[in-house]
Image: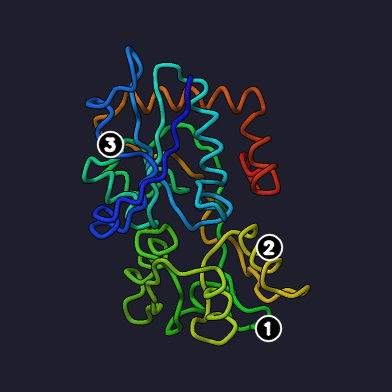
Amino acid sequence: MRRIVKQLVGTALVLSLGVTSLAGCAKKSSEAEAGAGVTKVIVGTGNAYEPYCYLDEKGELAGYEYNVLKAVDELLPDYEFEYQTSDFANVLISLDAGKIDLAAHQYEYNDERNEKYLFGKEAYTTYVTYITVPEDRSDITSLEDLAGLKAKSSTGSNATYILEQYNSEHEDSPIIIDYVDNGTDEETVTGLVNGVWDATISTKRDVEKLNKNYGDGSEVLKTVGDPVQSSSTYFVFDKENTKLQEAVDGALKTLKENGKLAEISIDIIGGDYTESE
């Protein structure tokens, strides 16, 4: 089965949604067929979240999400995946608009998302998050310690959901949330070290990556305290798209059972993050 990963300039789409298309004109899978008996699926994913979903130096889609999806597609002869990338916030907007059929950007379950979308039932990454601070800070170890301080987060992320939930329960002493979309890893490190933000929320493996890339041989950031959330990530679909969800879940289950999912995690992320940390 041929795989199609085409990169289009698509300036009109970039201007309207900030989207870089790798798939041609996005259509609902029920409307687009790649051949007799083969259904085209438009997958929306990210373009700047390394090592999960990003564009490499050649401008081509790379990362854990993409490699998992390729393995899933290989197990589904009745489907053909094409890819459309955008920043994190716009992936679910594209799903809302019917421009994609499957959203893939390390999405964790939360009640707000579950009301709008259909989550897969098979998780494919563990996601244990912690408060993250500069290495030399010792005054922050919990969400309570962040009251009145500034935390960096991004619109629509589960980290933001956690912070907003905390604030709704502590209206007299809220955390100041600085919503930063489309920020880079370097900006995150620089902002935390220079006091632009007091903390952010991330996984230990993301902090290890930031220290490796920007620490000059030493740790510049650290995780503190107990996990603020222990969850997993799932692919996300339109509420009506149960057939595709069931097909993708079946393929993911096979990849878990034959060890392929763990292999992809080890190769791309640096460890088996398909099981609990």
Q: Please give the name of the residue rendered at 71% of the width and 66% of the height, measured from the top-left corner.
A: 212
Crowd class of label 3 (few under 14; some 14 to 19; many from 20; radius 10 Å): many
Secondary structure, mark 1, is loop
Amino acid under disc 2: Glu
Looking at this view, is 122 or 38 the one in front? 38
Residue furthest to the top = 36
Secondary structure, mark 3, is loop
Q: Are marks 2 and 3 in contact (CB under 8 Å)?
A: no
Q: Percent x, y for residue 75?
A: 51, 20
Residue 261 lies left or right of residue 163; in this view the side is right
Q: Percent x, y for residue 50?
A: 56, 56
Residue 84, above or below 213: above
- The tag earlier along the polypeptide, 3 or 1, is 1
Q: CA distance from mark 2 to mark 3?
A: 34 Å
Q: Percent x, y for residue 17?
A: 27, 56
Residue 269 lies left or right of residue 7; in this view the side is right
Q: CA distance from mark 1 to mark 2?
A: 16 Å
Residue placed under numbered mark 3 in the picture: 238
- The tag earlier along the polypeptide, 2 or 3, is 2
Residue 56, above or below 114: below
Amino acid under disc 1: Asp
Residue 114 falls in which quadrant of the image?
Answer: top left
Q: Please give the name of the residue rendered at 54% of the width and 36% of the height, measured from the top-left corner.
A: 68
Residue placed under numbered mark 2 in the picture: 208
- The tag earlier along the polypeptide, 1 or 2, is 1
Q: Are marks 1 and 2 in contact (CB under 8 Å)?
A: no
Residue 274 falls in which quadrant of the image?
Answer: top right
Residue placed under numbered mark 1 in the picture: 136
Q: Please give the name of the residue rendered at 28% of the width and 55% of the height, measured from the top-left corner.
A: 11
